Image (cartoon, rainbow, N blue to C red):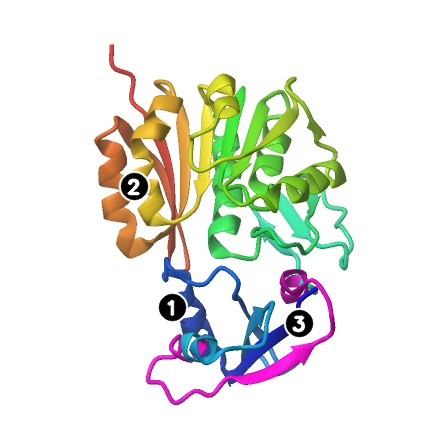
């Protein structure tokens, strides 16, 4: 295994959060550098650190990329070699549980809760994105819960860019007789999703209540085409790909079908909504979580 390192910057909470937001909107960020932010110690809520985890000794360009996340410059990230380990998993270890919609999402480091109407989902820290901590993932969980409460039904579900599989697993909890397809472009996600499905009692298969996994870019996959069309399609990715995939999503969602779109900043919402309006979708619901918009769209029926 290659050496694992991290770059660390200590700064006030608002400065670190601004740097995390700057990182989130960089579309060509080096995927080998995983960034996280957290309190330095309990009882010091305004003292934070940003950590950038790398599977190699940091290069000058790595240091510059991390420093550039901080407005005004003048930041010198400190480099630390860490023990041989899974560096992405380490960056997520100790992640605090979250509550979003009817879901309590936690890693195995934390116990489930025993509360009426709350579903516990256990998602270990892993190489795949999506432990529920990001505002877009939590927003999708809340939106799916709202859709269920408002009477939406789903028999076929697709989770595009699934990461850890969390949203597909949550959707099957809400619609237990549906069949779900969870896809991602990153091959590392396949075994991660399968493990998380097993941990949460979801079977892999093609029957109602089960899920299949595919590694594919966008909708370009035979399995995806065969399992569609989809009453509910979830895509928590980025604004650019959401706009590019609008025609493909429209071809996969029938009239009166539903989309949940996330990964877009509020300032990007107008462009995303315009792309889907041109494909026959209307806004059914909207949530804002921090700087992020979560959209529920419904495809219009043309008689």
Asked if the stretch drawn in magenta spans residue 38, the answer is no
* Residue at image location 59% in from the left, 22% down from the top: 179
Give the vertical position of 160 relative to 29 (above or below).
Answer: above
Residue 137: percent from the left, percent from the top? 51, 49
Badges 2 and 1: C-beta atoms under 8 Å apart?
A: no
Circle 1 crowding by C-alpha within 10 Å: few under 14, some 14–19, many from 20: some
Give the vertical position of 59 relative to 35 (above or below).
Answer: below
Asked if the stretch drawn in magenta spans residue 88, the answer is yes
* Residue at image location 49% in from the left, 35% down from the top: 216
- Could you give the CA–CA distance between mark 3 and mark 1, rounded to whole angstroms? 27 Å
Residue denoted by label 2 = 243
Q: Is 96 situated left or right of 157 in this image?
A: right
Q: Earlier in the sequence, mark 3 or mark 1?
A: 3
- Could you give the CA–CA distance between mark 2 and mark 3, rounded to whole angstroms? 38 Å
Nearest the eye: 51 or 170: 51
Quick one: quadrant of the C terminus? top left
Residue denoted by label 1 = 22
Residue 272: percent from the left, percent from the top? 28, 43
Nearest the eye: 26 or 58: 58
Question: Could you tell me which secondary element the residue under label 1 belongs to?
Answer: helix
Q: Residue furthest front?
A: 2
- Dot label at residue 3: 3
Magenta residue span:
66-92
């Amino acid at each position: 295994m290659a050496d694992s390192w991290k770059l660390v910057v200590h700064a006030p909470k608002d400065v670190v959060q601004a740097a995390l937001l700057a990182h989130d909107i960089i579309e060509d960020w080096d995927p080998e550098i995983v960034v996280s932010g957290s309190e330095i110690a309990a009882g010091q809520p305004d003292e934070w650190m940003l950590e950038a985890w790398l599977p190699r000794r940091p290069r000058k360009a790595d240091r510059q990329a991390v420093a550039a996340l901080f407005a005004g410059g003048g930041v010198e990230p400190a480099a630390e070699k860490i023990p041989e380990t899974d560096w992405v998993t380490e960056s997520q270890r100790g992640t605090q549980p979250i509550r979003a919609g009817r879901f309590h999402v936690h890693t195995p480091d934390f116990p489930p809760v025993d509360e009426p109407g709350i579903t516990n989902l256990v998602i270990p820290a892993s190489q795949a994105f999506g432990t529920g901590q990001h505002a877009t993932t939590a927003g999708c969980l809340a939106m799916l819960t709202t859709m269920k409460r408002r009477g939406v039904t789903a028999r076929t579900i697709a989770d595009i860019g699934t990461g850890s599989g969390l949203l597909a697993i949550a959707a099957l909890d809400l619609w237990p007789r549906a069949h779900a397809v969870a896809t991602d472009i990153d091959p590392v996600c396949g075994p991660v999703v399968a493990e998380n499905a097993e941990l949460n009692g979801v079977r892999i298969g093609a029957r109602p209540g089960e899920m299949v996994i595919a590694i594919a870019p966008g909708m370009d996959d035979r399995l995806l085409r065969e399992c569609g069309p989809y009453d509910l399609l979830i895509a928590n990715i980025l604004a650019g790909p959401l706009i590019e995939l609008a025609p493909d999503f429209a071809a996969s969602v029938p009239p009166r079908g539903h989309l949940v779109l996330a990964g877009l900043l509020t300032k990007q919402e107008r462009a995303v909504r315009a792309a889907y309006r041109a494909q026959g979708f209307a806004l059914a619901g909207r949530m804002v979580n921090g700087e992020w918009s979560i959209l529920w769209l419904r495809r219009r029926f043309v008689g």
